[in-house]
Image: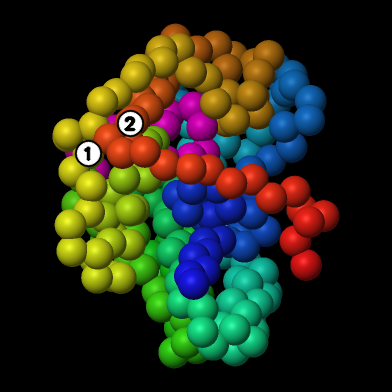
Amino acid sequence: AQESSSPSGSDGANTGESSTESGASSGDTSSAATSSDVRLDGDGAMTAKGLVIAGSTAFQLYGYAPKVNQRYAEALNRFAEKYPDVNTMCMVAPLNTEFYLPEKYKSQTADEKESIEKIYSMLSDKVKTIDAYGKLSQHLGEYIYFRTDHHWTQLGAYYGYTAFAEATGIANPTDITKLRTITYDNFLGSLYTQVKGTAAADKLSKEPDVLTAYLPDFNYELYYYPKESIE
């Protein structure tokens, strides 16, 4: 049996507080922003609803939340202690902010590598940590994060998978170049929605993201368990 966990809350890709684990705020997406929420900086970048929009990319400003991360680490430690026969693993992945945020805004965001290391240092030896950060940093010239969404792309997720494979001894991880693909154009994600109705959203919509689905080359079964059916 195996339990894998990440405070990123979705793909393991982002250390956003949308998962309540990492301290980066994803903002309120329940209503559209107004033009007064947007500030245009001298270099053409915008700030809106807690985001920085530079070029065609939206960035969340990350803030380390010690208490949140301590609770997260303690929860994992309790799980690992309670279920010793389960392989409990933890992969924390950074936001695109860590690698691509323009230098002038760096002082407004925390060091995510340091934050991840702090989280890992609080885990017991019963929890195996996985270095997604190091793997992603080897592929920064590739399309590993969406521009308009807080998740990593499918390619970024694949590199997270290869980090997992290396850490867990999977000898022959799937070769992504051998998989069939389906491409979906004009994807505008969660960060676009966060600033929808503003000049910032107009800027993001001029260069929408692309979704690439990688189709497995083997038969598989997917099981869905309603929450109320799990003890």
SS state under label 2: strand
In front here: 222 or 161?
222
Q: Which residue lies under the disc numbered 2?
A: 214
Tell me: 150 left or right of 134: right
Q: Return the mark for residue 24.
A: none
Residue 142 belongs to magenta span? yes
Q: Residue at x 73, y 23 (%)?
A: 33
Residue 137 visible in rendering: no
Residue 3: image location, x then y, percent:
52, 69
Coloring applied to the structure: rainbow
Instruction: Give the vertical position of 89 relative to 111 (above or below).
Output: below
What segment carries the magenta color?
140-152
- State the image coordinates of residue 216 (x, y, percent, origin top left): 32, 36
The span from disc 1 to disc 2 (Cα, nearest Å) is: 8 Å
Vertical arrangement, residue 52 with respect to residue 40, above or below? below
* Residue 229 seen anywhere in this rendered image of the structure: yes
Q: Is residue 113 magenta?
A: no
Q: Amino acid at mark 2?
A: Tyr
Q: Could you say which is closer to the camera, residue 3 or residue 120?
A: 3
In the rendered structure, find residue 176 and report the number of the disc placed on it: 1
Instruction: Tell me which residue sits at (59%, 84%) in the image.
Output: 83
Question: Where does the image place residue 164, in percent across and percent down from the top left?
Answer: 33, 62
222 lies above or below 63: above
- The residue drawn where x is 79% and y is 25% is 31
Q: Residues within 10 Å of mark 1 (few under 14, many from 20)?
A: some
Q: 50 left or right of 146?
A: right
Q: For this view, does 50 lie left or right of residue 129?
A: right
Badge 1 or badge 2: first in the primary sequence: 1
Question: What's under tag 1, amino acid-wise?
Answer: Ile
Q: Which secondary structure dominates the residues rendered in magenta?
A: loop
Pointer 1 with pointer 2, Cβ within 8 A: yes
Label 2 neighbour load within 10 Å: few <14, some 14-19, many 20+? some
